[in-house]
Amino acid sequence: MASTARLFYMAVWRDWLSLKRYKLNFVFELFSSVLFGLGMLLFALAFDTALLQRTVGTTNYVSFMIFGIAYQSWQSVALWGAAEMFRNELGSGQIDYTFSCPFSRYGYMICNVAALAVRSTVFFVPVFAVGLWFTRATLTPLGLLLGLSATALSVGALAQMGACFAALVLRHQQVTAIFGLFNFAFQMLTGMFIPMQVLPPSLRMIGIVALPQSFGMDLLRHYVMGTRTVLDLPYEWAVLLGQVVLYGLLAQLAVRRLERTAREQGLHYL
Amino acid sequence: MAIAIRCSELVKEYRTKKTVRALDAVDLEIEEGEVFGLLGPNGAGKTTLVRVLATLLRATDGRAWVGGYDVVQDEGEVRRIVGYAGQDSERSAYFRLTVRENLLYFGHALRGVPLRTAKERIDTFAEAVGFTEQLDKHFSTLSGGQKQLMIVMRALLHHPQIVFMDEPSKSLDPVTADRVRGYLVDYAREQGMTILLTTHNMDEAEDICDRLAFIDHGRIRFVGTPRAFRRSVTVQETVEVAMQDGDAIVEQLRGLPGVTRTTTEGTIRLYCDDGFAVLKEVVAVLDRSGTRAAVSMVEPSLEDAFSILVNNGKEAADG
């Protein structure tokens, strides 16, 4: 087995063991995921569905919100998973052992983030299923496949951004304030809870150009719910692919730079 | 004998607000199959040297080779053939996993040991050091010493050619430390493995190290066998007097001609240049006072040598 595949498989195994060791917590996390989805029904009552109809061409506010929320669980893992992992390893001293192993730091990060994404999917499925239930009229197998492909692609781009954040954590250790700011921006600018079409053009542009979540979610909603997209479909796919490549390069640079600093100054000195 | 580790003019500087030179032109050669100890006071540069050799840090100047590979240019190869057990390792595993699960994860995922082989080795290691009962306990429930033991096992699981151990028996009780040391040395001999360990435990250094180096202020001050180390720094001889109720003559012993220094922790130690001359004087004092005592000339311990070197270093640093 190739080393990255082996690490990915073992990291999934490790996370699964940790997860099932606390059974009650595991069951309740699943349960709250379903409850969260159902709670959106109440939210929908208070929302102006006419606005949603005008901007994206649907009145299905329940699924619109649920997909945004479900997506957020993957986003958290992709963006903060590597950073959180390194913060823990720095705190515990495990990072020395990890970094003495014959594995690229970048590969280690991505494998672990992918394993966390698998773990997160367990909790993503119930809430996502509730969202799908309300899209019965528009849902097709091909639509679901394309929607999930777009999601996977954008999560892939986010994982590269996550590698950059992880480099920040290792360099500066305490970056909670930066995380908070980005989290807020991501929720507001990417159409997670409100349609991107209602944003002022300048803010919308940030969401379109810089944040892979925007088109990940936009395409998912389009293929599953039949909503109108912000840009034409081919442009959205092209931007998404471009973001994967761009953030992939940035991530490699950030990790390489981090490694250089770490090896010059020592991680315990950072 | 082939060389397992070689350092040539190795310099490491940490550049923060002011530059700190942690390694200062270190030259060192460690032979294959040697158990080599690195001694020195806190902050002397021991851990930095180990980290440079384990590819965790890059030297500012000079070069180093591990297993014939350059630690900068062939870092991937170096990482493949070394095992590492660092300091602060008591928390450096997954708390929710058992010892066995942790070792399987690290061995298979990060070191590429086939699963079946890893399982067999874990059982063999555990049996050898009396750790079998702990294998299925969660890491979080282990004592500090048991955690340290797991970390040592982790470093050996992939049968490395060269192992770096930063204070491996720091938190172990004497019995466990002894068992681990014994196993480590037997294992190293059997596998032809080279071990570089840092330690503050002089008994450990004496017991298991073929050779050792003393490092202070980033400079290697001595390289040789533990016996040679003891002899190299202690020009003085020591007469040891063990007695009960001998308080009355302590001052007399201190004042004997030729005695340059005295310690009175437990037994009385009289440091001097001519041990036999002082011994005769001691016997005379004991005779006159009618005190019963056991008198002997003792070789300086490794700890004595260590203290003297550290003090010499301090004096030199103070100018």
Image (cartoon, coloured by chain):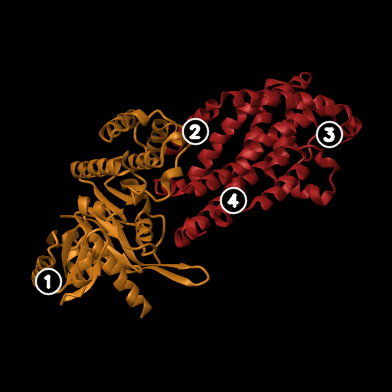
Name the residue that disc number 4 marks.
Answer: A164
Q: Which mark is residue A59?
A: none
Residue type, label 1 = Val
What type is the residue that disc 3 sits on? Val
Q: Residues within 10 Å of mark 2 (few under 14, many from 20)?
A: many
- Look at 38% across and 35% down and name the residue there: B103
Cα distance in 3D space between marks 1 and 4: 71 Å
- Residue B261 sits in which quadrant? bottom left
Q: Is residue A264 visible?
A: yes
Q: How many marks?
A: 4
Residue sticking out furthest to the bottom: B319
Q: Position of residue A14 (x, y in %)?
A: 48, 32
In the rendered image, residues at marks 3 and 1 fall on the same chain: no
> Quadrant of the rendered structure where residue A80 is?
top right
Instruction: Report which residue position mark 1 lands on.
Output: B278
> Mark 3: which secondary structure?
helix
Amino acid type, callout 4? Cys
Query: Crowdedness of circle 3 by 10 Å Cα count: few (<14), some, many (20+)?
Result: many
Badge nearest the viewer, 4 or 2: 2
Residue wearing tag 3: A56
Viewed as shown, does residue A239 lie left or right of B239?
right
Query: Residue B54: percent from the left, percent from the top?
Result: 36, 53
Please give the letter of the chain rendered in red. A
- Mark 3 and mark 4 on one chain: yes
Q: Chain of mark 2?
A: B
Q: Are marks 3 and 2 on the same chain?
A: no
Q: Which residue is mark 2?
A: B96
Q: Chain B rendered in what hue? A: orange
Q: Residue at x 44, y 70 (%)?
A: B20
Same subunit, labels 4 and 2: the answer reads no
In 3D space, how far apart are the residues under numbered discs 4 and 2 (Cα atoms)? 28 Å
* Res. A154 visible in picture: no
